[in-house]
């Protein structure tokens, strides 16, 4: 075989894998595995179907499964393959994953509302991404606070967000909404598009160049599937009409698939997210709220919580009108969530719940004292 006769990890299929995003770093990782088993060959995960996975080795796409050893070594959902992963196949079964450049993940259902007994921990979404498109509709889905959470989630995963305001054809004066998002999405590209009307989609070309991978994040009905169909230049997936009663579409995507686009890029569609729960805390909130972090430099105390401390530079900015109070409230809410998430990982649930109620009791006493 070619892989056994030469020292190269692979040869004839290299051009096909390059089109899927293969790079020199993966070449080096593959060499380490090839020293133990030269028969292993790489492929990219293009779809997840419960216990089965679609893979593409640069020549053909097919359905495969995990080896028993791989399955038993997985201790959490994050250890299992997701769309965008690079896998090693042995006898057409997945035996290992190559190191991920990054992984987009969120807290499973229940994490945001602290139902530890109902939450399933981390929920991986996609891996090895260049950009994450945060899609928000300009209809009733338009919500600045939700966009802030999405951006923080993406930054926490060490990735680059881009905000797409879809359905711009529904509003003649949509520029005000674009400016409002630009004010809270500091340093993040914001584009107004219409997937249904194919308006403004050319601005997305630089993100979807040969070998680049983009994932879509957004609520149900914001037009993610329509956007995929337009970028793929064919109706790959079915879409639902916009509801007259609620003014938006309904949930149509149920799987995560990596789709190759005519321009050479790839895009991963995802089911709509109802709950934006955090999992990682990698200073994403500091990047998403860079304006507040800068204002905090003027606080009298280094550990100022921006609540009632004297000499708070952030509160002063709110009072002067330089910082919207709702943005500060959003920031403080996410800060509390991330602190709770960090503490819950290091403390027992009973101890943490006891401390939380002690804090609530203290706050109630303070309120009653002020009233008296």
Image (cartoon, grey):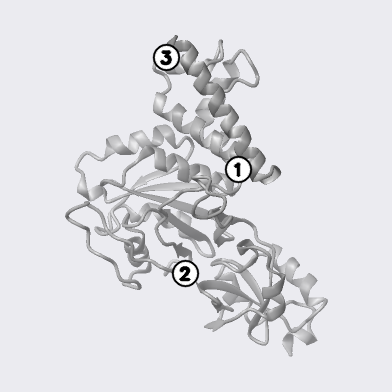
How crowded pointer 1 is (Cα within 10 Å; few <14, some 14-19, many 20+) is rated as: some
Give the secondary structure at mark 3: helix
| Residue 283 shows up from this direction | no
Of badges 1 and 3, nearer the viewer stands: 1
Of badges 3 and 2, nearer the viewer stands: 3
First reached walking from the N terminus: tag 3 or tag 2: 2
The residue nearer to you, when weighing 153 against 110, is 110
Which residue matches tag 1?
341
First reached walking from the N terminus: tag 1 or tag 2: 2
Q: Is residue 353 above or below residue 366?
A: below
First reached walking from the N terminus: tag 1 or tag 3: 3
| Residue 4 shows up from this direction | yes
Q: What is the distance, in whole Å, between disc 1 and disc 2 at their CAs?
A: 30 Å
How crowded pointer 2 is (Cα within 10 Å; few <14, some 14-19, many 20+) is rated as: many
Which residue matches tag 2?
257
Classify the position of the C terminus by image quarter: top left
Which residue matches tag 3?
319
Q: What is the distance, in whole Å, between disc 3 and disc 2 at their CAs?
A: 47 Å
The residue nearer to you, when weighing 100 against 272, is 272
Q: Position of residue 257 (x, y in %)?
A: 47, 69
Q: What is the distance, in whole Å, between disc 1 and disc 3 at their CAs?
A: 30 Å
Q: Position of residue 150 (x, y in %)?
A: 46, 46
Give the secondary structure at mark 2: strand
Give the secondary structure at mark 1: helix
């Amino acid at each position: 075989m070619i892989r056994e006769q030469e020292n190269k990890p692979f040869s004839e299929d290299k051009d096909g894998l390059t089109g899927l995003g293969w790079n020199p770093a993966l070449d080096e990782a593959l060499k380490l595995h090839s020293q133990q088993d030269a028969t292993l060959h790489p492929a990219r995960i293009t779809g997840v179907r419960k216990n089965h996975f679609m893979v593409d080795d640069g020549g053909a796409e097919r359905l495969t499964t995990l080896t028993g050893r791989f399955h038993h070594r997985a201790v959490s959902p994050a250890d299992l393959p997701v769309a965008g992963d690079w896998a090693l196949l042995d006898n057409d079964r997945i035996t290992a994953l190559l190191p991920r450049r990054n992984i987009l993940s969120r807290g499973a259902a229940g994490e945001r509302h602290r139902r530890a007994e109902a939450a399933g921990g981390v929920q991986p979404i996609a891996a090895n991404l260049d950009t994450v498109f945060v899609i928000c509709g300009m209809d009733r889905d338009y919500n600045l606070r939700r966009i802030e959470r999405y951006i923080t989630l993406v930054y926490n995963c060490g990735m680059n967000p881009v905000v797409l305001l879809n359905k711009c054809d529904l509003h003649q004066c949509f520029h005000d909404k674009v400016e409002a998002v630009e004010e809270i999405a500091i340093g993040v590209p914001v584009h107004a598009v219409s997937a249904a009307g194919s308006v403004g989609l050319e601005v997305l070309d630089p993100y979807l160049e040969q070998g680049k991978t983009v994932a879509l994040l957004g609520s149900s009905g914001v037009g993610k599937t329509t956007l995929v169909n337009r970028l793929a230049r064919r109706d790959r997936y079915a879409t639902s009409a916009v509801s007259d009663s609620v003014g938006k579409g309904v949930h149509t995507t149920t799987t995560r698939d990596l789709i190759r686009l005519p321009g050479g890029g790839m895009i991963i569609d995802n089911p709509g997210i109802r709950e934006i729960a955090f999992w990682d805390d990698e200073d994403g909130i500091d990047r998403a709220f860079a304006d507040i972090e800068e204002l905090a430099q003027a606080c009298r105390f280094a550990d100022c919580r921006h609540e009632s401390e004297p000499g708070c530079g952030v509160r002063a900015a709110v009072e002067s009108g330089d910082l919207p109070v709702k943005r500060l409230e959003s920031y403080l809410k996410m800060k509390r969530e991330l602190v709770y998430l960090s503490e819950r990982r290091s403390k027992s649930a009973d101890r943490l719940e006891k401390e939380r109620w002690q804090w609530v009791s203290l706050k109630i006493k303070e309120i009653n004292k002020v009233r008296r």
